[in-house]
Amino acid sequence: MLTVSETAELLRSFDRVLILTHVRPDGDTVGCAAALCAGLRALGKTAYLLPNPELTATTVPYARPYEAPADFLPDKVVSTDIATLGLLPENAKAYASRIDLAIDHHPSFEQFGAANIVRPEAAACGELIYSILAHLGPITAEMALPLYVAVSTDTGCFAYGNTTSNTHAVAAALMATGIDYHTVNKVFFRTKSRKRMQLEGAMLSTAEFYDHDRVAVLSVPMSLMEQFSATESDAEDLSALGGQIEGVDCAVTMRELRPDVWKVSVRTGARVNATQVCRMLGGGGHAAAAGCTVEAPWAEGKRQILAAVAQTAPDYES
């Protein structure tokens, strides 16, 4: 496993770099990739992001300026914020066996790169990318803006329990470069479309509670998305909703991707380890935020995830 300084030196030796992001890309993977691309270009390197077909309206502005042309042939491939090869988008799977450097912060990271660096204590992969870029040269505003997106989104605008003093220190350093963090905060944390609010209302109205109301299950079937003509941008980070319910310390959000195929997101407090829950179903993540995919009808999928929660929570009562 590489250190930060070793990673920086390795990147200095790279050129013609293609950077990969994960499926259903969030602000962390996109922000990390964009910042790293900007940092490599500042060194005079040729670097691009592999276009991700699942970008939302909020993340497109950070990735689009760095997207690779269709005829770009990389000499080196780097992944950012990807814990497992199963999280590669379809167009990235061709690079699965030739990832030269994997950069991540998940405890469930599978070390699939020829070289790897992971910092599980980091609230966001953006913190790790910041440290690497700081070894390569000055952090410019062009790097700082997507890094602020990465760090702020993975911490819920610094409200989640994963936030540390280092998270705030990194954010302060990024803000000091003169970036427009006000707009980032408004777009990502203080603005919701009407369709998004309709989705949230429907999810809350059909929410189910278990374990003395400490476990909440919220569902987003395909029919609900169709009912409101909601887009992926409207559905971004819906998994944060359940944890806002008073008394809930384990929020399960089931999002139907295809008929009877559910993306499960688990957000927890100290009582339940989200990674352990999702690992039982083939997924992973962090202690307080993890995910997996369940292929089953809704009732069976719910039963499986609740059974995993029951095995993990020491005092779960059905």
Image: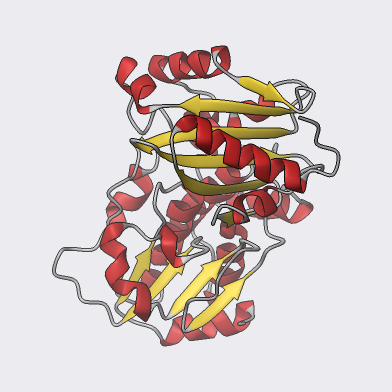
Residue 137 position (above or below residue 192) = below
Question: Residue 99 in the image: x percent, y percent?
Answer: 40, 77
- Side of 243 where 211 appears, left or right: right
Residue 201 position (above or below residue 39) = above
Q: Residue at x 58, y 75 (%)?
A: 117
Q: How is the image coloured?
A: secondary structure
Residue lying farthest to the left in this orientation: 71
Question: Residue 33 in the image: x percent, y percent?
Answer: 42, 60
Residue 160 position (above or below residue 230) = below
Quadrant where the C terminus is found in the figure: top right
Question: Residue 204 in the image: x percent, y percent?
Answer: 57, 16
Nearer-the-camera pick, 210 or 102: 210
Q: Residue at x 51, y 60 (%)?
A: 81
The answer to whether any part of residue 24 appears in the image is yes
Q: Residue at x 38, y 37 (%)?
A: 260
The answer to whether any part of residue 188 appears in the image is no
Question: Residue 45 in the image: x percent, y percent?
Answer: 34, 77
- Side of 100 where 276 appears, left or right: right
